[in-house]
């Protein structure tokens, strides 16, 4: 039980993710998450507005079940497998974040400065949450995939578009982390 | 009902992401600041081992459950779409500290505010769909 309750190291998680990819392929499907965002638009009736969404979403039901599973996995983990939410961050990271006003970096999984429920009711807090989501959804669909589809599936199958997309992920991530987050907070 | 297997794989994938802390905003910040090996080890490790699996798929050594060869779908090509789309995605990934997989994990954690991020992502995918024909590839 010790192993289950401890945080899992990279050399445990990396291979396990590869095994998920292996099993998805064994069962006849690819490994990827962000297509579901489009499928949810289709279910919501987006096909009436744009032909782009005129698809039979039932063909994607396997993938929707995959993300429902992810939600259940998150629930099981946070309720039964995580005695502590503390994260062993690099002390430099903690110090830097403290200077930016993040009071308890690494004390839990998420900073309350962004994820406290009260932020939904402030203009800035709401704008950050919905804006970040918009960038994720728009960018993932424009690029043709996210971390699972491009970084893991695409890179491991040596696809050039995925290498470009991952370079893009890092350009965007570095701009946000190094330049925009210090302005926003 | 055979799709239940994907639900089970999803549960496992959710637990892996949660237990390895990749759903933590801080881990993503640390990664983009190059202050920790953790995320690089996870993504890099997954890529390297998957690469081996991909070779075994290609050579036909591992077949799917029907005994057919496994073919990996080709990604859409386009310099602008992948690089610009990727950059837009990266901005959102670093700000929310979550990509689409972890977004769903955090819904399972019971994080209320992630629902706003999720809503934003749906709107983003919707707006992309509307503009898709006009966007450069």
Image: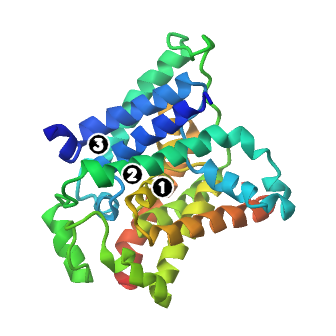
Mark 1 and mark 2: Cα distance apart in space: 8 Å
Q: Is residue A113 left or right of residue B116?
A: left
Nearer-the-camera pick, A155 or A72: A72
Q: Residue at image x 47%, y 35%?
A: B8
Closer mark to the observer between disc 1 and disc 3: 1
Residue B3 occupies quadrant:
top right
Mark 3 vs mark 2, CA separation in Å: 21 Å
Report whether mark 3 lies on the same chain as mark 2.
no
Q: Which residue is mark 3?
A: B41
Regarding residue A171, the answer to whether it shows in the image is yes
Crowd band around label 2 with a 10 angstrom C-alpha radius: few (<14), some (14–19), many (20+): many
The residue singled out by tag 1 in the image is B104
Give the position of the N terminus of chain B as an image quadrant.
top right
Is A5 left, or right, of B75 in this rendering? left
Question: In the rendered structure, are the residues bearing label 1 and label 2 in contact, judged by CB atoms less than 8 Å apart?
Answer: yes
Q: Are marks 1 and 2 on the same chain?
A: no
Q: Position of residue B27 (x, y in %)?
A: 30, 58
Closer to us: B128 or A1: A1
Mark 1, secondary structure of its residue? helix
* Residue A19 picture location, percent across and down: 40, 29
Q: Is residue B20 visible?
A: no
Give the answer, above or below, for where B38 lies relative to A109: above
Question: Mark 2 — residue?
Answer: A74
Label 2 sits on a secondary structure element that is: helix
- Decide if residue B80 is on the left or right side of residue B63: right
């Amino acid at each position: 039980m010790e192993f289950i309750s401890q945080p899992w190291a990279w050399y445990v998680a990396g291979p396990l993710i590869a095994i998920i990819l292996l099993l998805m392929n064994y069962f006849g499907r690819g490994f990827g998450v962000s297509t579901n965002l489009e499928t949810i638009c289709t279910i919501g009736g987006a096909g009436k507005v744009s032909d782009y969404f005129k698809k039979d979403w039932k063909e994607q039901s396997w993938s929707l079940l995959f993300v429902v599973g992810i939600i259940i996995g998150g629930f099981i983990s946070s309720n039964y497998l995580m005695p502590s939410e503390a994260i062993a961050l690099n002390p430099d990271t903690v110090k830097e974040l403290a200077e930016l006003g993040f009071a308890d970096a690494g004390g839990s999984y998420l900073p309350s400065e962004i994820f406290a429920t009260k932020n939904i009711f402030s203009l800035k807090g709401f704008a950050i949450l919905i804006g970040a989501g918009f960038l994720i959804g728009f960018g993932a669909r424009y690029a043709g995939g996210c971390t699972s589809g491009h970084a893991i599936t695409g890179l491991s199958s040596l696809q050039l578009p995925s290498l470009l997309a991952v370079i893009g992920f890092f350009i965007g991530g570095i701009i946000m982390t190094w330049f925009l987050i210090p302005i926003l907070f | 009902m055979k799709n239940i297997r994907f639900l089970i794989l999803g549960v496992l994938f959710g637990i892996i992401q949660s237990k390895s802390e990749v759903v933590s905003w801080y881990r993503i910040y640390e990664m983009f600041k190059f202050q920790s090996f953790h995320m690089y080890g996870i993504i890099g490790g997954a890529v390297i081992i998957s690469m081996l699996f991909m070779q075994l798929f290609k050579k036909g050594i591992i077949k799917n459950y029907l005994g057919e060869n496994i073919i990996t779908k080709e990604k859409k090509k386009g310099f602008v779409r992948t690089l610009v789309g990727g950059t837009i995605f990266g901005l959102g990934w670093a700000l929310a500290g979550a990509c689409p997989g972890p977004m769903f994990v955090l819904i399972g954690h019971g994080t209320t505010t992630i629902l706003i991020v999720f809503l934003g992502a749906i709107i983003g995918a919707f707006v992309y769909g509307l503009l898709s024909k006009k966007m450069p590839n």
